[in-house]
Amino acid sequence: MLRVCLLLSVLFLVGCDRLLGADDAPPVVAPVAPPQVTIATNLRQGATLYVDGQDRGALTNGGRVTVGPGAHVFEARRDDEILARVERTLESGREAEVRLMTTSPPGAEPVAGASKPGAAPVTRATVALGEIVLEEGREAMASEARRALRARVRSIQGCYERALSSRPGARGDVRLLVRVAPTGTVRSAEVVEGVDSEVDACARDAVRRLRFARSDGGRFRTSFSFNPPSVEAAPSVEAAPSAARPTPSRGEVVGAMRAVEPLVRACSPGRHGTASVRFTFRGSDGAVESAPVSGDWPAEVVACVERAAMTARLAPFSRERFAVSYPFRL
């Protein structure tokens, strides 16, 4: 009897061992580490890091951010202006570096007509967006207008600097009265006070292209202040003319594209994708000659993107024409 009991015990233990064997045990799954991203930047303090449109805090060189695997858009912004933008696709468990760089050195502001060493310091022409006073309509209209117009200031400054080449004394404020239709389009932009016909038209056109959310419409006033460059303690010596560059630099082109990007994105609020625009710029004045749009988009979106793209501007260059394609994410 004792032998039978021992035999049964051995069989029972062997069976349990098989039931709990390594081959039948559930697999051990290692946790997936999210991608770790190190940010490299040459921007000074005051810029903010955005990932996929979300504020991720102050932008710092060497700062780290955790994101999920897949495609992401990293942006450096200051006062709603996009200073640098990078698109990356990241894998799980991998580390990556995203470089948000501008063409200017750290802490420097772009300076038009910078003086040579030893010469009197020259300040560049400035354009400043004034207060937006809402007279009628929803409160969000003022903040929408402020964000969109801040992105247009650089383009408006290009108009102003071209006007200064023939009218160096042009300065003052352009004040506008803007009426918005219930559809969200600008019904009219009336120049109440102007500086110069070319500058006034540039500011007015920028306002006319604004797009707002549908509502009962509204009305607001805004202004731009224009000031020409000044020379501190300037000696009475004529500056030697600088040689015109043959084509624009990559930084200039990217800056011009970013200036019109908010207008382009506003053309398709309900649908997302990429619209590629083929720009042809004139060398004589840096204006856009043509801007055909490619992509599977409705005709009204294509027409809107083309109108927005035609507002892009570059500084004049010596070659007769310069062409470049740029993909806009709508």
Image: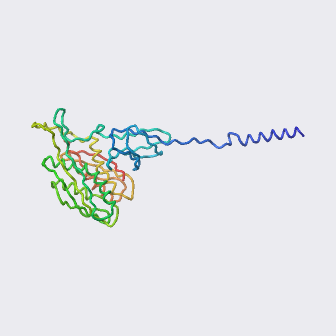
- Picture coordinates of residue 247, whole percent (x, y): 23, 41
Task: Determine the residue positioned at 24% across, 63% down.
Answer: 188
Quarter the N terminus occupies: top right
Residue 208 placement, left or right of 99: left
Question: Dividing the picture into quarters, in which one does residue 254 lie?
Answer: top left
The quadrant in which residue 57 appears is top left
Colour mode? rainbow
Q: Residue at x 77, y 39 (%)?
A: 14
Which residue is at the front of the view, 315 or 38? 38
Please state the horizontal and vertical placement of residue 310, each as a whole percent of the image.
25, 53
**Near-viewer residue (40 or 121):** 121
Q: Position of residue 38 (x, y in %)?
A: 42, 39
Identify the residue at image location x=21%, y=54%. 202
Q: Is residue 266 left or right of residue 282?
A: right
- Residue at the top extreme of this rendering: 118
Does residue 188 lie above or below 47 as drawn? Answer: below
